[in-house]
Image (tube, rainbow, N blue to C red):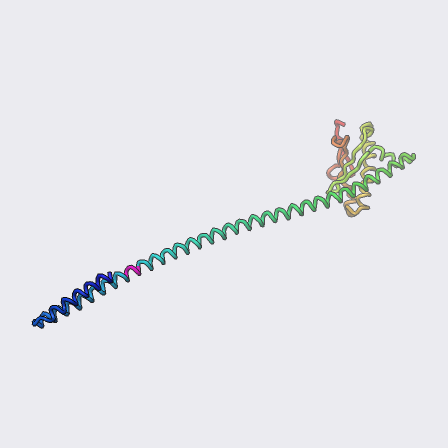
Amino acid sequence: MSSLLAILIVVFFILFIYYWRKKNKAKKWIFLLLTILASVLFTQTSYYKEQAQKDKENERIASSKKAESKKIESSKIAELKKNSISNQKAKKSSIKKDESIKNNSSNKTTSKKNKGINKALAKRLKEDQSFADQGNDEFAYAKYAYKVTADKNNNVNIYVTGDFLQLSNSQKNNVGSKLQTMANSVLYEEGKINDDEYREKPITEFFLNNKVSLGTSQVFDHSKFHWNKNN
């Protein structure tokens, strides 16, 4: 556009010189004014076109930057959401892991305590059985059981021999009460129960062959037993 303008100016300048040499001064000045107006017109037209192109280019650049900014912002928001979800999952996983560790630790602790009290019960039963073997009838009850255990709630399980089935309900009550008293004493000595629990007696259940329930403590009086009629 600028080269075309230059050519036109040169042409007008040549024509201006040509008409200037002529005698008609009015035509000279008119042509001079036309030359100036034409030059200004071409110059302004070129300027506005270039300015319009620049404005259009600036708008395009601004629009591109805005779109890129939105894209980056959306990407950041998506990344933040992703990180937030990952952090929440990691936190939940960590909490579950901690709970699992605590539960395992608690279970291991409970298991160790149960093993400890069960060893003490086994030791006491063996001692009483040895006294019975020596002819001490006060400990004859111990010969009717081969294992005594306690669970985490200090409930007592007594595993009896087949000879226990030959006893009458009255005899079962007598033998069962002595076995329960023995277990209750061990629990108290080992610090598993307090004074009130010692007086109340533990809930006690009797088994044959590790799985057949023969009887259990009554609900309102743990020192009294309910025997299954089938046995």
- Of 70 and 98, nearer the camera is 70
The answer to whether residue 159 is above or below residue 91 is above
**Res. 20 visible in picture:** yes
Position of 175 with respect to 41 (left or right) is right
- Of 226 and 40, nearer the camera is 40
For the N terminus, the image quarter is: bottom left
Span highlighted in magenta in the image: 51-55
- Of 206 and 8, nearer the camera is 8
Question: Where does the image place residue 209, in percent across and percent down from the top left?
Answer: 77, 30
Question: Where does the image place residue 94, in percent across and percent down from the top left?
Answer: 61, 49
Question: Where does the image place residue 126, in percent across and percent down from the top left?
Answer: 85, 37
For the C terminus, the image quarter is: top right
- Dominant secondary-structure state across the stretch colored magenta: helix
Q: Quadrant of residue 220?
A: top right
Question: Where does the image place residue 72, in percent across and percent down from the top left?
Answer: 44, 54
Q: Residue at x 33, y 58 (%)?
A: 59
Position of 156 with respect to 95 (left or right) is right
Position of 204 with respect to 15 (left or right) is right
Position of 87 with respect to 141 (left or right) is left
The residue sitting at the right extreme is: 135
Q: Quadrant of residue 158?
A: top right
**Res. 221 visible in picture:** no
The answer to whether residue 220 is above or below residue 24 is above
Q: Quadrant of residue 68?
A: bottom left
Disc tally is 0
